[in-house]
Image: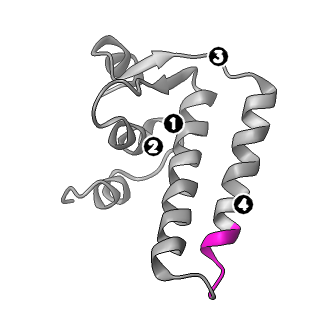
């Protein structure tokens, strides 16, 4: 699967990120990573912050390649995670584990 294939089947949309938008998303990701590390927060809130961080990084990877997920399509979070090997070079086995697949 390629990013172009995902575009063809409407899982991704062409997108041109604006610098201010990238900065906002990077700042949000940084805050969520910091929150995920706060031991005083509940495990549920730490997990939520870590998940947001991962999704924000996945979005940045897509944006850097000229795409974004089609949020009107079910499974757009899974699409963003599955695209990580294509956008950021993350190994396929790590991506499978994050999306509930098997290596």
Query: What SS does tag 1 mark?
Result: helix
Going from N to C along the chain, the mark reached first, 1 or 4, is 4
In this picture, is 15 found above or below 56? above
**Quarter of the rendering occupied by the C terminus:** bottom left
In this picture, is 28 found above or below 71? below
Q: Nearer the viewer, residue 7 or 76?
A: 76
Q: Nearer the viewer, residue 71 or 86?
A: 71
Across and down, in percent, residue 97 comes to: 30, 61
Judging by the rendered image, the residue that carries numbered circle 4 is 31
Judging by the rendered image, the residue that carries numbered circle 1 is 87
Q: Nearer the viewer, residue 99 or 103?
A: 99
**Direction from residue 15 to residue 78 in the image, left or right:** left
Badge 2 vs badge 1, beta-carbon distance below 8 Å: yes
Going from N to C along the chain, the mark reached first, 4 or 2, is 4
Q: Residue furthest left?
A: 102
Q: Nearer the viewer, mark 1 or mark 4?
A: 4
Query: What SS does tag 4 mark?
Result: helix
Across and down, in percent, residue 8 comes to: 32, 11
Judging by the rendered image, the residue that carries numbered circle 2 is 84
Judging by the rendered image, the residue that carries numbered circle 3 is 16
Q: CA distance from mark 4 to mark 3?
A: 24 Å
Give the residue at x 52% y 82%: 42
Q: CA distance from mark 3 to mark 1?
A: 15 Å
Query: What SS does tag 3 mark?
Result: loop
Label 2 CA crowd tier, 10 Å (few <14, some 14–19, many 20+): many
Give the residue at x 74% y 30%: 21
Q: CA distance from mark 1 to mark 4?
A: 22 Å
């Amino acid at each position: 699967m390629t990013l172009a294939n995902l575009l063809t089947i409407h899982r991704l949309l062409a997108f041109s990120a604006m610098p201010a938008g990238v900065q906002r998303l990077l700042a949000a990701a940084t805050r969520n990573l910091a929150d995920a590390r706060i031991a005083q927060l509940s495990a549920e809130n730490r997990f939520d912050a870590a998940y947001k961080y991962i999704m924000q990084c996945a979005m940045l990877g897509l944006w850097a390649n000229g795409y974004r997920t089609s949020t009107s399509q079910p499974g757009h979070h899974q699409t963003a995670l599955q695209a990580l090997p294509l956008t950021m070079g993350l190994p396929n086995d790590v991506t499978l584990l994050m999306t509930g697949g098997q290596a």
